[in-house]
Image (spheres, helix red, strand yellow):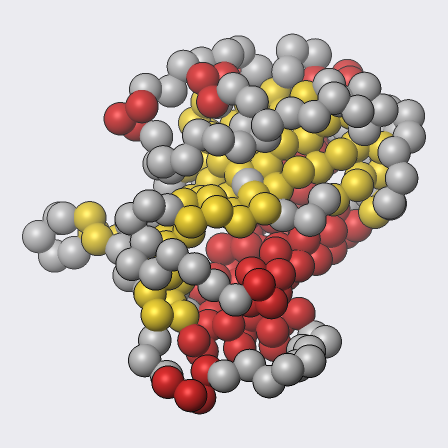
């Protein structure tokens, strides 16, 4: 498989987003441009909180109709140079990555996709990353000690443990989908947790609670899965993936309905 330097996908699943569009550097809601193969193709589309930036290859609607399975690769994680704390325990990063992977897989399965481990003619290959991650270390001292051989088997509990030690204060989700056998890139998506404006109108970034982080991951994963599935639907049956109510109403329907 061709390896693309691809971190959620698929502006082409919305007809207006098929055309290539250059996103000015000053408008980018992320800083790291090291994951996707071509950031200039991304186009903004509405999401429930701000915007997603998405791309779909020409003819992606017809191209995706033949796929019914997805390989979800283990997500990559990278830190922002601006992060107050620029390191993490390997098990902590793995917990975050597996939480993201599991959530995306569940959202895809809810829309009728099979999650598989091998490439094939009907199999998509999905690469994902959390980039521009900013962490702030909590002052916990010896209480943050990780015993040798310690394993938390439940992914949600593992992430909750991570967030007892550090605060997540900013991040971006990036994803790219390709045909697993040929490596042809079919779409990409970038979404981030937006800054919060204070009373003076100045943008600031606040720590995320676990529930907020979980909500970000679940909502971004749901939009991603919706956009992939949209391409398998007739044009008159596609939904607004930026609208939670529209996604929920379409959930469970067959690809052709």
- 161 is higher (above) or lower (below) than 232: below
Position above or below: 24 against 210: above
Quadrant in the picture for residue 153: bottom right
Relative to 255, 86 lies left or right: left
Q: Measured from the top left, where is residue 70 in percent x and y?
A: 80, 39
Q: Position of residue 54 (x, y in %)?
A: 52, 28
Q: Residue at x 38, y 56 (%)?
A: 86
Q: Looking at the image, which residue is at 49% across and 36% down?
A: 190
Q: Quadrant of the N terminus?
A: top right
Residue 165 percent coordinates (x, y): 43, 76
Q: How many marks?
A: 0
**Horizontal placement of 125 versus 139: left or right?**
right
Q: Which residue: 73% across, 51% down?
A: 105
Camera sees residue 252: no
Q: Is residue 153 left or right of residue 94?
A: right
Residue 71 visible at all: yes
- Residues 11 and 40: in front is 40
In the rendered image, the quadrant that contains the C terminus is: top right
Q: List x then y, in percent, for residue 223.
A: 59, 42
Along the line of sight, the residue nearer the viewer: 47 or 144? 144
Q: Residue visible at 49% across and 55% down?
A: 216
Residue 46 position by quadrant: top left
């Amino acid at each position: 498989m061709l390896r693309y330097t691809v971190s959620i996908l698929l502006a082409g699943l919305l007809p207006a987003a098929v055309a290539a569009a250059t996103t000015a550097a000053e408008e980018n809601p992320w800083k790291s441009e090291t994951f996707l193969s071509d950031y200039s193709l991304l186009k903004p589309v509405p999401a429930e909180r701000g915007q997603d930036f998405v791309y779909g290859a020409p003819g992606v609607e017809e191209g995706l109709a033949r796929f019914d399975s997805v390989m979800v690769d283990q997500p990559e994680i990278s830190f922002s140079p601006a992060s107050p704390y620029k390191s993490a325990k390997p098990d902590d990063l793995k917990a975050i990555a597996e939480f993201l992977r599991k959530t995306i897989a569940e959202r895809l399965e809810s829309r009728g996709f099979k999650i598989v481990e091998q490439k094939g003619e009907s199999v998509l290959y999905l690469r994902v990353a959390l980039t521009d991650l900013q962490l702030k270390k909590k002052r916990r001292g010896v209480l943050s000690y990780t015993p040798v051989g310690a394993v938390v088997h439940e992914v949600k509990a593992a992430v909750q443990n991570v967030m007892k030690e550090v605060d997540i204060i900013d991040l971006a989700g990036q994803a790219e989908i390709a045909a697993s056998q040929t490596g042809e890139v079919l779409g990409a998506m970038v979404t981030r947790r937006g800054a919060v404006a204070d009373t003076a109108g100045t943008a600031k970034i606040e720590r995320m609670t676990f529930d907020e982080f979980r909500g970000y991951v679940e909502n971004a994963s749901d939009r991603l899965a919706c956009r992939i599935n949209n391409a398998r639907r007739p044009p008159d049956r596609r939904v607004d993936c930026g609208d939670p109510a529209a996604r929920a109403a379409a959930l469970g329907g067959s690809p052709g309905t």
